[in-house]
Amino acid sequence: MKSLSLLFFLISTFCFSQEKEIVKILNEQIKKEIRDQFENPYFDGDTLTMMKEFSINNKILSVQMKKSNGFRTVVETQEVPISKISSVGKDINIIFDAMGNDVKIKSKKFSKDDGEEVFESDSEMFFTYIHFPGIEYVGNDLLKAFEKAGFKINKNYWYD
């Protein structure tokens, strides 16, 4: 019985540390892109600010970002159970695809003309805001970290 308990403890500790690796990969890459956003030739004019870092709590991946331009500001919070993530891909940014509409999105939009608007929606896609080209290695690293954490996901499309 002791050996079974020890085995369970070791497996759960290992999986938890791999969840930390998922968060580490995402946070390191988004911080790099935010730091370099104005110098990058692919800067799209929207200024990103990370309000709350990527985190996994109670098996829920979440992030809160602020996106601003001269006309409006949007603060968006996304959450998805990591067990519902089925694949990672890159189109306009790195996207996690989820089974069903399991991504919960809360958005607050602030504009001079319209004031404040609040939206809540469900989606199949979790947008990471990580979008600079030449970062396919990030997708590969995420695949490995998810697998080591006990979640098998696929890498689908990858457009740089």
Image (cartoon, grey):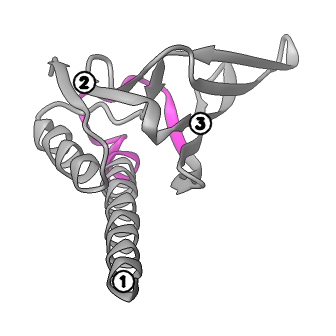
Find disc 2 in the rendering and name its residue: 89
131 or 45: nearer the eye? 131
Disc 1 residue type? Leu
Q: Amino acid at mark 3?
A: Glu
User: Does residue 11 appear to the left or right of 109 in the view shown?
Assistant: left
Local crowd at mark 3 within 10 Å, few (<14), some, or many (≥20)? Answer: many
- Identified at 29% across, 26% down, the residue is 87
Q: Is residue 13 magenta?
A: no
3 and 1 marks in contact (CB < 8 Å): no
Q: Position of residue 109 (x, y in %)?
A: 75, 22
**For discs 3 and 1, the disc positioned in front in the rendered view:** 1
Of callouts 2 and 3, the N-terminal one: 3
Residue range of the region highlighted in magenta in the rendering: 32-49
- The CA span between labels 3 and 1 is 32 Å
- Could you say whether the residue bearing mark 1 is in a helix, strand or loop? helix
Question: In the drawing, does residue 150 fall left or right of residue 66?
Answer: left
The quadrant of the image that shows the N terminus is: bottom left
Residue sitting at x 32%, y 69%: 11
Residue at left 20%, top 28%?
154
